[in-house]
Image: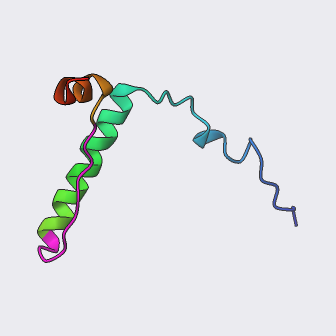
Amino acid sequence: MRPAVLGPAVFASHASAVVYNKAWLSGWIKDFNGKVDAAQKAHPSVKLSKVHLHTLKLGTAKLGW
């Protein structure tokens, strides 16, 4: 029986070089908000919140900083 060895070889398929940038984040937000919409339709009595992203530039325009 082989010992269970966890290491880079076992998780090599999950060690992809993911770049966390604005495109990745907007895709994640779109996916999450879609799942929230589906859950809201399935459970209308539960209040769920979507993710909203506000950049500093938008905040300065709104607040007049």
Q: Report the span colored magenta.
A: 42-53
> Which residue is at the front of the view, 14 or 63?
63
Characterize the magenta stretch by its predominant secondary structure. loop
**Residue lying farthest to the front in this orientation:** 65
> Which residue is at the front of the view, 50 or 7?
50
Where is 18 relative to 4, above or below?
A: above
- In percent of width and height, residue 5 lies at 82, 55
> To which quarter of the image does residue 30 belong?
top left
> Which residue is at the front of the view, 42 or 52?
52
Q: Residue at x 22, y 26 (%)?
A: 58
Q: Residue at x 30, y 34 (%)?
A: 26
- In percent of width and height, residue 65 lies at 26, 23
**Residue lying farthest to the bottom in this orientation:** 45
> To which quarter of the image does residue 64 belong?
top left
Q: Residue at x 87, y 62 (%)?
A: 3
> Which residue is at the front of the view, 65 or 10?
65
Q: Is residue 48 left or right of residue 2?
A: left
Where is 33 relative to 27, above or below?
A: below
- In percent of width and height, residue 37 lies at 16, 58
Q: Is residue 65 magenta?
A: no
Q: Is residue 43 left or right of residue 24?
A: left
